[in-house]
Image (cartoon, helix red, strand yellow):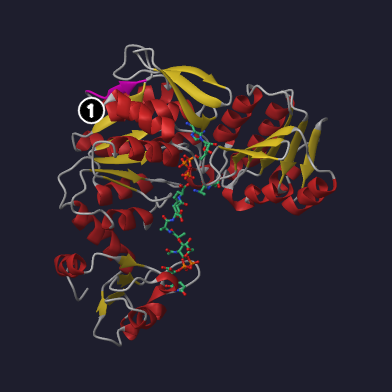
Amino acid sequence: MNITIEQLYQIYREHPLISTDTRKIETGSLFFALKGANFNGNKFALQALEKGAAYAIIDEEEFATNERCLLVDNVLTCLQELSAFHRQQFDIPIIAVTGSNGKTTTKELLNQVLSKKFKTHATEGNFNNHIGVPLTLLKMPEDTEIALIEMGDNHMGEVAALCQIAHPTHGFITNIGKDHLEGFGNFENNIRAKSEIFDYLIKHDGIAFINSKDPILKNMAKRFKNPIWYGGEYDFAFLELEGAHPYISYKDRQEELIQTQLIGAYNFENILLTFCIGKYFEVTNQDIHEAIRSYTPSNNRSQLIEKGSNIIILDAYNANPSSVEAALESFDSFETKKEKVVIIGDMLELGNISEEEHQKMIELASSKSFERRIFVGPLFHQSIELEGIEKYADKELLVKNLTENPLSNSAILIKGSRGIKLETLLDVL
Ligand SMILES: CC(=O)N[C@H]1[C@@H](OP(=O)(O)OP(=O)(O)OC[C@H]2O[C@@H](n3ccc(=O)[nH]c3=O)[C@H](O)[C@@H]2O)O[C@H](CO)[C@@H](O)[C@@H]1O[C@H](C)C(=O)N[C@@H](C)C(=O)N[C@H](CCC(=O)N[C@@H](CCC[C@@H](N)C(=O)O)C(=O)O)C(=O)O
Ligand SMILES: Nc1ncnc2c1ncn2[C@@H]1O[C@H](COP(=O)(O)OP(=O)(O)OP(=O)(O)O)[C@@H](O)[C@H]1O
Ligand SMILES: C[C@@H](N)C(=O)N[C@H](C)C(=O)O
């Protein structure tokens, strides 16, 4: 490496804008020439400078054809080290947001709540991996008072590595489910992988927020001297679910009834966790409830959409056995006079439990009194035939069917993995 992190940090202080993509370069930014599955970013270094980048950080000498090309050993590692260096300039609470399901929703809720009192910086969207976390940290303004850093994982060691970059002072695991088992190998490994956040916090005297109603998390929390408990009546934070018909309403200890714009009983856990952390950081009850009340989900995550005579629950952002089960149970208790239809797409990245779990979801849906149970994608298509189940090998076949036989006066749950993009079904509903 021809430049030290300290020297690069001085340059970053003068140009505190990071670009990684010449298709959307920002003037005066530092272009980090990452390598990916499709391109070698080094090849775009000159283009980045021509388009207005102040410097290009590269790791292949042959592309160092301009004095504003800064050669380092490895661009990705350099980006991570620079972001860790930037993070170390802050003596503020940094909250790590991890878990199988509900990370982004909880992070968004918390961002609303904490912003009532603090200058809060939070992960945008779900920029939560080895590139997204550094980019998030490098966007953290100097006057930040508290930060929410989402950490996603699909293999062992990932959360530990992200902790070495973000150095969280606080953290939580929303829940541990059967997500990404292809990378983890099995459920036990997923528990071990998620516990990397606790390993880090324990070693650095950090604070963990623990759902006392979740047996796995409760067991894992035994290692903490003083975790902050939530969920139980005598815990630090407690709320009571009033209903989810379909919007969640809840009461706090003062018996105040709060009506939210979130659907799906599973989102109550996310609300509880948000309430706990808001309370811990002494945001007033009034401000916490106001922030939760006004939060509306977007980006295909548990959205309620009325279209013609149909009501659609669009939950097409991602899917794994735990979240599909939660969605089916929640939809089953959804009170409506309309005919209930479920459209479930393949659950990706499940490894060797994939076949079994797809079969289980079909059986679960069969046990519910839905009018139609539609499964779409090659993984569901391979499962054993069951009466009352409609299977489509691909989305186009389903689109054809729905175009020829439009659904009306129905309540429709749509849930599937990102790869299958079930939100496009909205066009024919
Ligand atoms: C490397 C990169 O940033 N890639 C983004 C890029 O992809 P593209 O297909 O263009 O090509 P390459 O990746 O090969 O590009 C190499 C670089 O070259 C640049 N470049 C290319 C062409 C060009 O003309 N000019 C150029 O400068 C290019 O920009 C690269 O820097 O663009 C895509 C479209 O915008 C991006 O999708 C792609 O982003 C990748 C996927 C990425 O990792 N982005 C992070 C910022 C991020 O956080 N993304 C999240 C994904 C989070 C996620 O899936 N999380 C999982 C768990 C974590 C799994 C983890 N192990 C993992 O591997 O990700 C979860 O379940 O939550 C997001 O996008 O939401
Ligand atoms: N507490 C929960 N329990 C089970 N399922 C949940 C929970 N919270 C959210 N979900 C489901 O997960 C979907 C995605 O939510 P969200 O984006 O918040 O999760 P995530 O963990 O951030 O996912 P990703 O890492 O892929 O971004 C929701 O639409 C819902 O179906
Ligand atoms: C979109 C990505 N974060 C994710 O959750 N992927 C899984 C496999 C999904 O789409 O269900």
Dividing the picture into quarters, in which one does residue 71 lie? bottom left
Dividing the picture into quarters, in which one does residue 131 lie? bottom left
Asked if residue 229 is among those painted magenta in the image, a careful observer would answer: yes
- Apparent side of residue 240 relative to residue 27 in the rendered image (left or right): right
- Apparent side of residue 126 relative to residue 350 in the rendered image (left or right): left
Q: Is residue 230 above or below residue 110?
A: above
- From the viewer's side, name the closer residue of 167 and 54: 54
Can you say which quadrant of the picture contains the N terminus?
Answer: bottom left
Q: Quadrant of ligand 1?
A: bottom left
Q: Does dot 1 land on a helix, a strand or a loop?
A: loop
In the image, residue 227 lies at what x, y percent? 26, 25
Residue underneath mark 1: 282
Q: Residues within 10 Å of mark 1 (few under 14, many from 20)?
A: few
In the image, residue 9 lies at what x, y percent? 18, 65
User: Can see residue 370?
Assistant: yes
Amino acid at circle 1 = Glu
In the image, residue 419 lies at what x, y percent? 60, 52
Q: Residue furthest right?
A: 404
- Overall secondary structure of the magenta section: strand
- From the viewer's side, name the closer residue of 114 and 370: 114
Which residue is depicted at the point 67% across and 43% down? Answer: 345
| Residue range highlighted in magenta | 226-230
Which residue is depicted at the point 47% across and 18% down? Answer: 241
Q: Is residue 306 above or below residue 63?
A: above
